[in-house]
Amino acid sequence: MENNSLGLKAELKSLVKPIFVEIALVMLLGAVDTVMLSHLDTGVEGGSDNAVAAVGLDNQLINLVILIFQFVSTGTGIVCAQYIGAGFRKKLVQVVGIALMMNLLVGLSMSIFLYFKAETVLEFMNLRPELMKDGASYLRITGSFVFFQAIGLAFSASLRSAGLVKYPMRVTFIVNIINIIGNYSLIFGHFGLPALGVEGAAISTVVCRGVSMTALAIIHTKKHIDKFPLEWFRPFPWQELKNVLKIGVPAAGEELSYCLSQVVITYFINYLGNTALATRTYCANCIMFVNLFCVSVVQGGGIVVGHLIGMKKAEAAFKMGNFVYRYALIITLVIGTLLAFLGHPILSFLTDNQEIIRLGTIIFFIDIILDIGRVGNIFATGTLRSTGDAVYPVIIGIIFQWSIAVGVSYLLGITFSLGLIGMWIGFTLDENLRAIILRRRWLSKRWKTKTLVK
């Protein structure tokens, strides 16, 4: 039994390392845009902070769109992990084929919508006139090609479910290099290219997503599934579609609810002014690196748990889950505390606005308490999904994200005039209350009856 436990932990570590690097590189893609735009000389006082604020709002909206694709990818990854554990090859191929088809159709639809309706969406978000030009340009360019991301997510989820996590990592590494060169060239105008500012950052992002999708498609064909026989889809495998949606729709429901709540909160922050919106963007880009280890450990643990559930080893899955939680919590708190104490010099590098630096430094310290709840939520939500228990986190998420994260943050931030600090206190309360409830669900082991492999 001890050898088996050591073997599972070794498997977890072999998955976590490349996932960690991949997610870090994905986060770096967004952070590079923020850092470079923060040093953009617009010729207007506060112009670089305004560019960061506009792109930060756009990325909130793009992330919301990506979550629509993510519900298929999340369901695909979990179903595939259980089928791999059970040895169901034909069903595996059917699930991946369905995911690619659905993400392509939805991705093209969203790309067309964002191309024609970029200004309309930003006007609905009440984006200030001085930010509209940059915001509309960035959203139209990145949104028009968002289908690249949709297809890439499906390929990446399939590769991860099979434990082939090093390939998405390598692709993301290459894409980061392209993005840094592209941003440097197109934002500031180097190597004979025009200085396009925010528009240049958008073009670089689109090129990177296209390269990523193409590379993942090639690797997927060579290393995992080389063909999708048409006879395996005649008649159409409705049961496999049902299984993907059974996990994916609830998973997307929780994440979509969270992302929508964040969009509404961003709408509130926009009322506080450009300084608050820019502070939120700077802080969010720093804090996501604190979450990096937790997310990568939970994703790696989810693959192992999914395989164990497919092999009908529920008790081993439970022990693995508990190990993942302890591991993620300790490391995240250490990194979060480090960020809090280094917050002032980090923000001083990004901006010379003293109010942004002051607010951001306070937020980093509040975020240490928020980290405790965030780790519990990331762990419980991700691991419960891996077992097939995807509906419960949605119910809890919707209730608390809107009553606490949105309601309390508005009450403290706007009604009681505590601003961004009051809103962050509301976020902290939401994360910790949800974490307590979802952790109890995991410890109750009710998820044992939710497996997809019968």
Image: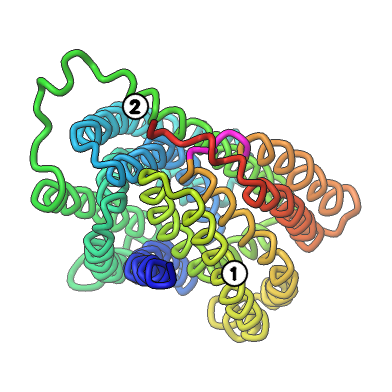
- For the residue carrying disc 1, how many other residues have a C-alpha within 10 Å: few (<14), some (14-19), or many (20+)? few
Query: Is tag 1's residue or tag 2's residue first in the polypeptide sequence?
Result: 2
Give the side of residue 3 with respect to residue 337, left or right. Answer: left
Residue 402 sits in which quadrant? top right
Residue at figure coordinates x 18%, y 70% from the top left: 192
Marks 1 and 2: CB-CB under 8 Å? no
Specify the amino acid type for callout 1.
Arg
Residue at figure coordinates x 10%, y 20% from the top left: 231
* Secondary structure at numbered mark 2: helix
Q: How is the image coloured?
A: rainbow
Image spot of residue 83 (x, y percent): 30, 40
- Image quarter where the N terminus lies is bottom left
Give the side of residue 437 with respect to residue 110, left or right. Answer: right
- For the residue carrying disc 2, how many other residues have a C-alpha within 10 Å: few (<14), some (14-19), or many (20+)? some
Give the number of the disc on residue 443. Answer: none
Residue at figure coordinates x 25%, y 63% from the top left: 175
Between disc 1 and disc 2, the foreground one is 1
Query: Residues in magenta?
Result: 388-392
Q: In the image, is residue 105 above or below residue 208?
A: above
Give the side of residue 418 with respect to residue 237, left or right. Answer: right
Q: Name, please, the residue furthest toward the right.
A: 416
Q: Main secondary structure of the magenta part?
A: loop
Q: In the image, is residue 365 above or below residue 254?
A: below
Is residue 46 something that shows in the picture? no
Image spot of residue 434 (x, y percent): 71, 49
Specify the amino acid type for callout 2.
Ser
Give the alpha-carbon distance from disc 1 to disc 2, as whole Å.
42 Å
| Residue holding disc 1 | 326
| Residue holding disc 2 | 109
